[in-house]
């Protein structure tokens, strides 16, 4: 969740906002890797769409020996001293690292489906390409890394307690329900569960809390906390191992020590939590079901998780779309959910977080029957709603955290990482955002990347909402825009190495499992570092805006 202090207003010294793009996608590859000639390309600047970007015909190749890379005209934050001599790195050394990184990625499964191959999102092994990644790790202060890790169990507990407060969730989202049909449907299911007096005795949460380190205040500030479909537990571990491998071979030439890259056990700990939930359900015949999208280029991240469950815990998984669950699912009188005749113990959602996942009533029927069942949901409808932007904003209000947590030290730790977050019924904040839109982000109740509003679009949207005089403003919240440090880096996408200045976002995974009053798991479970060029607004890897990275502790 991107919770924020309602009293924390950005000041006038923040840099202006940006409107540029990250790595554009293209229908045909424009570079074939040649180990004797590494070519580097700057990303072109074009308007960003929600899910894909197009190549500009004006984009040009930049040879390795071109010297200093020009700074993007309007950057977020300010430049910091890089971990290594970015501009003076030896060409032959860089060429070897790029080649070795591409080989390592191919051999170790650091892959996604190629969007230019029609069946790459449906048939495993078809149209694989290396996942986008940073060639070398990003520096991050060890003290802030420890802070983020320590916050995880507190946020896990907070989500669980918020999920149990039916009245709070319904009332906080009541205005949003009137103008946001997707949130309204989720709330309808939530209400039906309340009417049934449905109790989730076994509750499982696999979360990821995302942070940025603000350059001006030096504070670690939270962007959001994901309570549904927290992606990349599998591939993030591989990037950590890739960077360790590269530094084991080339670290002496760069002045870097692979031991400064912290271990990453996200995939094994997520697998352990899912397996433990399966065990608590206490039906050895039952399966764990992954709810997936019809086409999923990121399927290999999910397969790493199901493979870990089978090899480490002997738990069998199946993959079903919402439409398939509607067609094959049955709810038995005792509450057991069967899909294709097989009982389901745990439902793990890697779909169902966006309106596009529900193109018909079939998908909504599937969501309802799953919620009605006795299977362990990850997440339940209550956990899902607890991760909405509006709930994040409500938790930022004075004295609201005290409704759910008793420990004053824990409350203080959470508030310390809150960025500014406001509802659109605050006229003073609206006035401020119209005058200075570059220091705000406007967020709808959506997950998955590509949905937020930045810069002049914030002003235009707010003015439109004021003119129309409807309740559509309830579909959004305003958040303080965070300006992290900018660092030079090398980024790999589709076999091409890019030189640019970038910012990073740290995600900390967390697992929470309880059975009635017994908390079985409440742990920090590894991390995800995502890096994007500093001129990009969005940060989703799967949506095409960022690359996978790892951490180098400083």
Image (tube, rainbow, N blue to C red):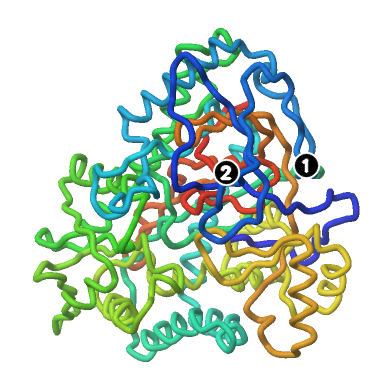
Asked if residue 487 can be seen in this view, the reply is yes
Total marks in image: 2
Question: Hey, which quadrant is residue 325 in on the image?
Answer: bottom left
Badge nearest the viewer, 1 or 2: 2
Q: Mark 2, residues whose alpha carbon is within 10 Å: few (<14), some, or many (≥20)?
A: many
Q: Which quarter of the rendered picture does the C terminus lie within? A: top right
Question: Hey, which quadrant is residue 517 in on the image?
Answer: bottom left
Task: Answer with mark 1 or mark 2, whichever residue precedes in sequence.
Answer: 2
Where is residue 509? Give x, y as percent.
47, 48
Question: Element at badge 1?
Answer: loop
Question: Hey, which quadrant is residue 343 in on the image?
Answer: bottom left
Q: What residue is shown with label 1?
A: 77
Question: Which label belongs to residue 21?
Answer: none
Task: Reply above or below: 6 against 529.
Answer: below
Report whether 526 appears left or right of 66.
left
Where is residue 400? Give x, y as percent.
66, 72
Q: Which quarter of the rendered picture does the N terminus lie within? A: bottom right
Q: Residue at left 44%, top 74%?
A: 382
Q: What residue is shown with label 2?
A: 23
Q: CA distance from mark 1 to mark 2?
A: 20 Å
Where is residue 151? Give x, y as percent.
57, 49
**Front-most of 439 and 194?**
439
Where is residue 383? Give x, y as percent.
44, 69
Task: Reply above or below: 252 against 478.
Answer: above
Report whether 445 appears left or right of 131.
right
């Amino acid at each position: 969740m991107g919770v924020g202090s309602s009293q924390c207003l950005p000041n006038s010294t923040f840099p202006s906002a940006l409107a540029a793009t990250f790595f554009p996608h293209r229908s045909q590859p424009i570079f074939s890797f040649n180990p004797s000639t590494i070519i580097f390309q700057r990303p072109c600047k074009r308007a960003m769409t929600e899910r894909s970007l197009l190549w500009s015909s004006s984009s040009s190749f930049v040879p390795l020996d071109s010297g200093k890379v020009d700074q993007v005209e309007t950057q977020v934050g300010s430049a910091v001293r890089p971990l290594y001599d970015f501009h003076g790195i030896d060409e032959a050394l860089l060429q070897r690292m790029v080649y070795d990184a591409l080989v390592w990625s191919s051999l170790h499964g650091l892959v996604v489906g190629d969007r230019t191959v029609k069946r790459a999102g449906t048939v495993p092994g078809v149209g694989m390409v290396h996942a986008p990644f940073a060639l070398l790790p990003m520096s991050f202060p060890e003290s802030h890394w420890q802070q983020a890790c320590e916050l995880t169990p507190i946020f896990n507990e907070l989500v669980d307690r918020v999920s149990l407060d039916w009245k709070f969730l319904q009332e906080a989202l009541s205005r949003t329900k009137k103008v946001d049909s997707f949130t309204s449907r989720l709330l309808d299911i939530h209400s039906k569960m309340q009417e049934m007096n449905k109790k989730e005795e076994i509750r499982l949460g696999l979360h990821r809390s995302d942070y940025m380190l603000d350059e001006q205040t030096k504070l670690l500030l939270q962007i959001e906390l994901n309570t549904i479909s927290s992606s990349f537990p599998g591939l993030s571990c591989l990037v950590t191992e890739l960077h360790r491998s590269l530094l084991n071979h080339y670290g002496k030439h760069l002045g870097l020590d692979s031991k400064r890259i912290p271990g990453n056990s996200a995939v094994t700990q997520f697998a352990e939590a899912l397996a433990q939930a399966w065990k608590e359900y206490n039906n050895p015949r039952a399966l764990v079901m992954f709810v997936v999208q019809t086409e999923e280029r990121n399927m290999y991240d999910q397969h790493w998780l199901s493979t870990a469950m089978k090899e480490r815990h002997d738990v069998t998984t199946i993959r079903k779309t919402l439409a398939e669950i509607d067609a094959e699912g049955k709810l038995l009188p005792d509450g057991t959910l069967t899909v294709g005749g097989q009982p389901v113990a745990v439902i793990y959602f890697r779909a169902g977080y966006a309106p596009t996942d529900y193109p018909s009533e079939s998908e909504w029927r599937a969501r309802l029957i799953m919620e009605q069942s006795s299977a362990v949901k990850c997440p339940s409808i209550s956990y899902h709603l607890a991760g909405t932007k509006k709930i994040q904003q409500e938790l930022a209000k004075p004295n609201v955290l005290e409704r759910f947590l008793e420990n004053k030290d824990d409350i203080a730790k959470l508030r310390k990482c809150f960025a500014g977050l406001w509802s659109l019924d605050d006229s003073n904040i609206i006035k401020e955002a119209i005058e200075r839109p570059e220091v705000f982000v406007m967020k709808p109740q959506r997950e998955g990347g590509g949905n937020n509003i930045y810069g002049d679009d914030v002003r235009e949207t707010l003015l439109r909402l004021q003119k129309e005089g409807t309740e559509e403003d309830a579909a959004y919240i305003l958040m303080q825009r965070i300006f992290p440090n900018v660092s030079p880096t090398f980024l790999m996408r589709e076999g091409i190495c890019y030189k640019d200045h970038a910012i990073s976002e740290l995600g900390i995974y967390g697992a929470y499992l309880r059975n009635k009053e017994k908390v079985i798991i409440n742990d920090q479970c590894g991390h995800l570092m995502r890096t994007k060029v500093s001129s990009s607004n969005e940060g989703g890897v799967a949506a095409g805006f960022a690359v996978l990275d790892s951490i180098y502790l400083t």
